[in-house]
């Protein structure tokens, strides 16, 4: 019984600690600061350097009338 | 790189410490007041929300302390709740843990995803700044609905996307309908049990701008880099750029497009055709839409769209499905009308201007989805409470404003600022009044008739086209919603609105109405910055209204690099 | 080349909207019906008892009053028309037969409706809804719109005969003008054209802004003269070009291009003759109104159309025109702030050289063309680049 109590107490303690840490992240906007100063510059670098196909090279040729059959 | 203690201290102060004025710092400590402020939050006039920002970033040195109850609600039921639900939504819509992998692939492939959507909690923060109690709760539920639906849509796109799935046309690709964002989702109700419809532009650049406006600038620049002039509607420019940069997911075998809301939207149909290069069906809406003679034509185009879907997917439209979803959507409409009634006639309406506008345009465009009903239930409970208990949700209201024309996407939360700074409460806006149509389902003819009316009243076009009387209905709505001020959005690249500028000037003068013109360029903050928008409102409030701000710290601050 | 008969008289007629022939027709007791867009079929406005005037605002300066109403961020064509209306320049109009086919001209026409601008007690402005597709549903809809918003209104307001017989007669007269214009325009297809782009644009514009019954004889004279007209002994141009794009009603702009050495041999723009001056064909069993509705939808190459195959055909059509008229290149001109042509021009500029092999000069201009110097430089450079290419080709051959 005592052990279970101890475990429960420990779990509660850990939960409280995590909760406290999350509150700190929330209150001091650490999520925002991480995304702004670390994540976003990383992503910008990635997407700026990403190889992209030249979409405008796609020919724009004739096509049959796909709507002809959908006249109500 | 050498880092010294001084630098660290300076950085710490910049990021975390709210500087007090010498006057404030030298004040004798009033513990009773401090305790009261801790427990209840500071009174509106003492909040100094502008002091919380980190430089020009829009980040907070610390998030606002709203009193114990509201701060803990915000932390538990908004911040934690939404982060947790984002993860669960990714798994739910991605069909289990593999959804996380799909999400990661999308995040790494698309700029509008990787750079944008993770910053979503700041979107909440900006929109809900300064709100308290029931207003904070109800508005946050609306945001939650939009986040969940956004996740559903991009997860569907990623799951179907040929580009991140090795070029394969998988089953999801074969069962997804791509359509123009201005074509309402209700067109596809008849297939909702077997197919899914996802708007092409909604997630990549419309919602994304609200969340983080940095991304879209790449697309606008890309469009102009190949010769497009700078003056067409920047929304359409962004769509062009998305194609030029090859940054759209390939998630459907077809495309359905429309002419809403303007000439630019017609013009982008060519882009969709060119770059997507797959069967495309155009479902244009008539311009003179309240001419009784146009209705049959419009209905036939809808039926044409249905046949197109049937033919391309080999699945017959299910009338019972249509009825089920249309009736379900009507419940959302009925609740919207209830909300309008409370907003128009009482001070107990618990949703702030930005939440009202974005939620309404999002769900009415998207169509019937379970999340909207879930959110409406939460909001209904809150609204019932505020009305029953006569809770004034925006107690510092000095002016009830109506916002007209299309809003700046990069600063849709200007109304949160305007209330906090000046007590201007934006009660209703033009975009909320679109799609104002009940869908009858008793007969096929009635259903089709109402569906065509619904689509004719799509965003912007309901007011901006089809005759002067539509755009000038502002004055009727102003009366209906008991407003004493107009915020007149002045989208610099919208030819329809620019073309009627002087008529509004004349009318405002004639009717002696306080109207503040707010110039902007939809998603592009470089044309008119948020600070310039605030300056315009500040100038009007000081010089014309002769009023003093509620929170002077919000008058002038730099958020040029903010999301 | 020898001067074309009537050409200077016709040029004079373009100096104001209420020109001497318009005044003469009004004096003959006919109703003047204004319109701005090709989607308002002029043939219906040319029924006995009335005549069509496609609105222009020649010799415009700075449209200050219109800019107050429409800001300086809208198409200047729309603003200049409104300025002219505010100045009283359109008071001769008995009606404006309006279409909501592009945003700014729509606003201009709505202003005529709302603001009591036209000082003519009989004046009214009526809008017709124009569809975005060329399918049967659209033709049916368009026909109904034309019946209700054009024919019925003309009958109701001015007692115009709108019977099938009257329509057939109007089609016949309209087709005669079209045949003449096509004949006159066909001389641009010659290896050495015997008519300049400027001359042709003056003639074509006059058919749009003058009562047709008063100019048809002049067209016949011109056609007759062209049968024997000889080109200059030495070529006065270096290359031949197609001019395409948005609204263009200024012959001086064509002159500017031609002064730079590019002969304009085809005119595929609003107010141009391609494909606007194709004859209306009444098929067997078809009512004349149905034939008109079908003709105006099926024949148009406006970037407003959204059917997938039509959007693609537009590019092919332009390439075909260039081939038929033996053009060396294409000039795509867009009125600043024209949303449709912003996109169309950008896309055409990429696609036409690549997929069809035609060099393109892509420009943006204002209705009141003040940027003559810059445009001249652009056109000269374009002409030179084509010449260089031709030299290279010859060298390779």
Image (cartoon, coloured by chain):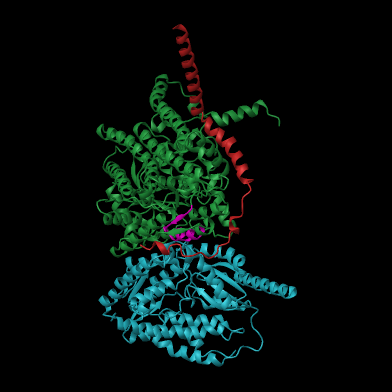
Chain colours: A red, B green, C cyan
Q: Is residue B263 magenta?
A: yes
- Locate residue B477 relative to residue B70 in the image: left or right: left
Q: Is residue C138 visible?
A: yes
Q: In the image shown, does C349 or A27 lie closer to the viewer?
A: C349
* Nearer the observer, B128 or B276: B276
- In this view, the residue farthest toward the right is C395
Image quadrant holding the N terminus of chain B, namely: top right
**Residue B480, image x, y percentages:** 27, 49
Judging depth in this view, the residue of B112 and C106 nearest the camera is B112
Q: Where, by quadrant of the figure, is residue C70 drawn? A: bottom left
Residue C232: image quadrant is bottom right
Q: Is residue C39 positioned above or below B291 on the image?
A: below
Residue B158 rendering spot, x and y as whole percentages: 51, 43
Image location (x, y in percent) of residue A34 = 56, 33
Q: Is residue B239 above or below residue C377?
A: above
Task: Tell me if residue C92 can be seen.
Answer: no
Is A33 covered by the magenta stretch? no
Q: Position of residue C130 (x, y in %)?
A: 38, 67
Q: Residue furthest front?
A: B314
The correct choice, above or below, for B145 with respect to C244 in the image is above
- The image shows residue B157, relative to residue C332, as above or below, that is above
Q: Residue at x 65, y 27 (%)?
A: B6
Q: Which residues are magenta?
A: B253-271
């Amino acid at each position: 019984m005592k052990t279970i109590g101890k475990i429960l107490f420990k779990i509660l303690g850990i939960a409280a600690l995590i909760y406290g840490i999350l509150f700190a992240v929330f209150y001091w906007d650490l999520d925002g600061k991480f995304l702004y100063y670390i994540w976003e510059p990383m992503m910008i670098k990635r997407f700026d350097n990403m190889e992209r196909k030249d979409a405008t090279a796609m020919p724009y040729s004739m096509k049959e009338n796909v709507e002809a059959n959908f006249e109500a | 790189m050498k880092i010294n203690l001084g630098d660290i201290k300076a950085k710490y102060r910049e990021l975390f410490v709210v500087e007090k004025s010498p006057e404030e710092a030298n004040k004798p400590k009033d513990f009773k007041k401090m305790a009261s402020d801790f427990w209840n939050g500071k009174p509106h006039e003492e909040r100094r929300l502008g002091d919380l920002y980190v430089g020009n970033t829009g980040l907070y040195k610390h998030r606002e302390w709203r009193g114990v109850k509201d701060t803990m609600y915000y932390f538990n039921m908004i911040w934690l709740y939404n982060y947790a639900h984002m993860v669960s939504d990714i798994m739910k819509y991605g069909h289990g843990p593999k959804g996380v992998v799909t999400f990661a692939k999308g995040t790494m492939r698309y700029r509008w995803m990787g750079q944008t959507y993770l910053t979503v909690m700041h979107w909440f923060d900006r929109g809900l700044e300064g709100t308290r109690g029931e207003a904070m709760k109800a508005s946050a539920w609306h945001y939650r609905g939009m986040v969940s639906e956004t996740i559903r849509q991009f997860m569907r796109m990623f799951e179907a996307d040929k580009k991140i799935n090795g070029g394969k046309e998988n089953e999801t690709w074969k069962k997804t309908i791509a359509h123009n964002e201005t074509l309402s989702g209700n067109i596809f109700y008849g297939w909702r049990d077997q197919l899914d419809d996802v708007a092409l532009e909604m997630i990549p650049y419309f919602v994304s701008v609200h969340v983080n406006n940095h991304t879209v600038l790449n697309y606008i620049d890309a469009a102009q880099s190949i010769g497009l002039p700078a003056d067409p509607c920047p929304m359409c420019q962004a769509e062009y750029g998305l194609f030029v940069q090859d940054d759209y997911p390939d998630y459907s075998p077809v495309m359905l497009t429309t002419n809403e809301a303007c000439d630019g939207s017609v013009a982008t149909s060519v882009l969709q055709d060119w770059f997507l290069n797959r069967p495309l069906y155009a479902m244009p809406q008539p311009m003179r839409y309240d001419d009784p003679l146009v209705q049959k034509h419009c209905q036939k185009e809808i039926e044409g769209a249905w046949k197109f879907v049937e033919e391309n997917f080999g699945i017959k439209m299910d009338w019972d499905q249509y009825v089920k979803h249309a009736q379900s959507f009507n419940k959302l409409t009925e609740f919207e009308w209830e909300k309008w009634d409370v907003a128009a006639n009482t001070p107990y309406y618990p949703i702030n201007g930005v939440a009202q506008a974005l939620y309404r345009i999002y769900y009415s465009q998207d169509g019937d989805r379970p999340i909207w009903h879930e959110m409406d239930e939460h909001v209904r409970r809150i609204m019932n409470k505020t009305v029953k208990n006569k809770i004034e949700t925006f107690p510092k209201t000095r002016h009830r404003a109506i916002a007209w024309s299309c809003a700046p996407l990069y600063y849709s939360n200007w109304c949160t600022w305007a209330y906090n700074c000046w007590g201007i409460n934006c009660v209703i806006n033009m975009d909320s009044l679109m799609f104002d149509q009940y869908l009858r389902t008793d007969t096929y003819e009635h259903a089709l008739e109402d569906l065509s009316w619904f689509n004719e009243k799509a965003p912007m076009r309901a007011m901006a086209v089809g005759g002067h009387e539509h755009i000038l209905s502002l004055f009727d709505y102003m009366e209906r919603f008991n407003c004493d001020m107009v915020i007149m959005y002045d989208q610099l690249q919208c030819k329809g609105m620019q073309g009627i500028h002087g008529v509004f000037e004349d009318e405002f003068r004639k009717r002696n109405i306080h109207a503040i013109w707010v110039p902007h360029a939809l998603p592009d903050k470089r044309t008119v910055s948020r600070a310039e928008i605030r300056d315009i409102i500040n100038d009007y409030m000081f010089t014309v209204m002769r009023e003093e701000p509620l929170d002077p710290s919000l008058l002038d601050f730099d958020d040029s690099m903010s999301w | 080349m020898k001067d074309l008969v009537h050409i200077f008289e016709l040029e004079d007629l373009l100096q104001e909207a209420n020109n001497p022939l318009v005044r003469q027709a009004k004096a003959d007791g006919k109703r003047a019906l204004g319109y701005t867009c090709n989607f308002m079929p002029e043939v219906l406005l040319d029924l006995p008892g009335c005549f069509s005037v496609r609105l222009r605002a020649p010799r415009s300066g700075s449209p200050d009053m219109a800019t107050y109403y429409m800001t300086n961020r809208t198409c200047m064509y729309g603003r200049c028309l409104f300025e002219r209306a505010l100045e009283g320049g359109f008071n001769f109009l008995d009606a404006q037969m309006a279409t909501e086919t592009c945003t700014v001209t729509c606003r201009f026409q709505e202003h005529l409706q709302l603001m009591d601008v036209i000082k003519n007690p009989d004046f009214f402005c009526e809008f017709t809804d124009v569809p975005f597709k060329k399918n049967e549903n659209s033709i049916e809809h368009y026909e109904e719109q034309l019946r209700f918003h054009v024919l019925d209104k003309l009958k109701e307001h001015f007692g115009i005969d709108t019977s099938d017989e009257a329509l057939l007669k109007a089609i016949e007269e309209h087709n005669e003008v079209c045949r003449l214009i096509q004949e006159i325009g066909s001389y641009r297809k010659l290896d050495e054209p015997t008519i300049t782009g400027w001359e042709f644009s003056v003639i074509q514009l006059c058919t749009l802004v003058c009562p047709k019954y008063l100019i048809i004889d002049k067209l016949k004279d011109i056609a007759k003269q062209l049968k024997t007209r000889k080109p200059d002994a030495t070529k006065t141009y270096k290359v031949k070009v197609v001019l395409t794009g948005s609204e263009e009603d200024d012959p001086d702009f064509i002159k500017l291009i031609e002064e730079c050495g590019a002969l304009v041999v085809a005119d595929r723009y609003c107010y141009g003759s391609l494909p606007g001056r194709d004859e209306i064909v009444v098929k067997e069993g078809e009512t004349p109104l149905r034939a008109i509705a079908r003709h105006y939808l099926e024949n148009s190459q406006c970037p407003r159309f959204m059917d997938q195959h039509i959007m693609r055909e537009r590019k092919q059509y332009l390439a075909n025109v260039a081939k038929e008229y033996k053009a060396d290149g294409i000039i795509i001109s867009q009125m600043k702030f024209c949303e449709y042509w912003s996109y169309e021009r950008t896309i055409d500029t990429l696609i036409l050289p690549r997929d069809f092999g035609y060099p393109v000069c892509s420009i943006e201009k204002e209705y009141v063309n003040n940027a003559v110097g810059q445009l001249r430089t652009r056109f000269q450079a374009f002409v030179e680049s084509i010449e260089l290419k031709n030299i290279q080709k010859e060298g390779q051959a």
